[in-house]
Image (cartoon, rainbow, N blue to C red):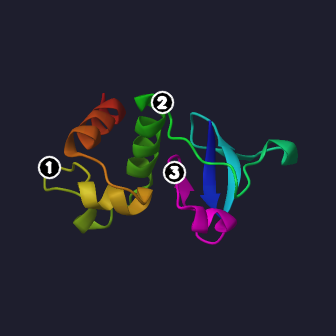
Amino acid sequence: MKMLKHKETGVLYGYSVPKSEMSCMETVEVDTDGVVNAVPEDDKTDENTPTVAPTGTDARMAEIIKAIRGLDRNVAESFTQTGKPKVPAIEAALGYDITAAERDAAYSAITE
């Protein structure tokens, strides 16, 4: 799936970003394992092309799962006492808000 990657921070965005931020973005291809690949030059998004949110929940779920897997288990503040990742920790990794239900679904997908 195509996503936008911030050139300075490396943060991936699958959803619309303000037009003023487009100059800081590059288009990348992210596979289902979260591996980022370059996009051919003629297939890139420019500042005049609006970004579109993925139509299904699969892309969003894949992003949440990737963020959970990337959390450092040694940072106690990122996890509940039962070991479940905290929503704010996931949101910080993603750069956008999620619900507890989305966190629970992603966490269940990883632990089952």
Whether 14 is among the magenta residues is yes
The three-letter amino acid code for the residue at tag 1 is Thr
Name, please, the residue furthest toward the front: 48
Residue identified by numbered label 1: 82
Task: Estimate the spatial distance between the alpha carbons at disc 3 and disc 1, rounded to whole Å.
Answer: 34 Å
Mark-to-mark CA distance, 2 and 3: 12 Å
Q: Quick one: label 1, few (<14), some, or many (20+) residues within 10 Å? A: few
Q: Position of residue 44 (x, y in %)?
A: 77, 47
Q: Which residues are magenta?
A: 7-24
Asked whether 63 falls inside the magenta stretch, the response is no
Give the number of the disc on residue 55: 2
Q: Earlier in the sequence, mark 3 or mark 1?
A: 3
Between tags 2 and 1, which lies in front? 2
Pick the front one: 17 or 66: 17
Q: Type of residue at label 3? A: Ser
Amino acid marked by disc 2: Thr
Secondary structure category for the residue under label 1: loop
Left or right: where 111 falls relative to 45:
left
In the picture provided, is 96 more to the left or to the right than 108?
A: right
Q: Which quadrant: the N terminus?
A: top right
Which SS class for mark 3? loop
Locate residue 4, reporting x and y percent: 62, 52
In the rendered image, which residue does mark 3 sit on? 16
The CA span between labels 2 and 1 is 33 Å
Give the class, few, some or many, for how many residues have Cα within 10 Å of label 2's Cα (few <14, many ≥20): few
SS state under label 2: loop
In depth, the one of 67 and 4 nearer the eye is 4
x then y, percent, for residue 80 = 17, 56
* Residue in the picture at 59% in, 67% down: 21
Q: Earlier in the sequence, mark 2 or mark 3?
A: 3
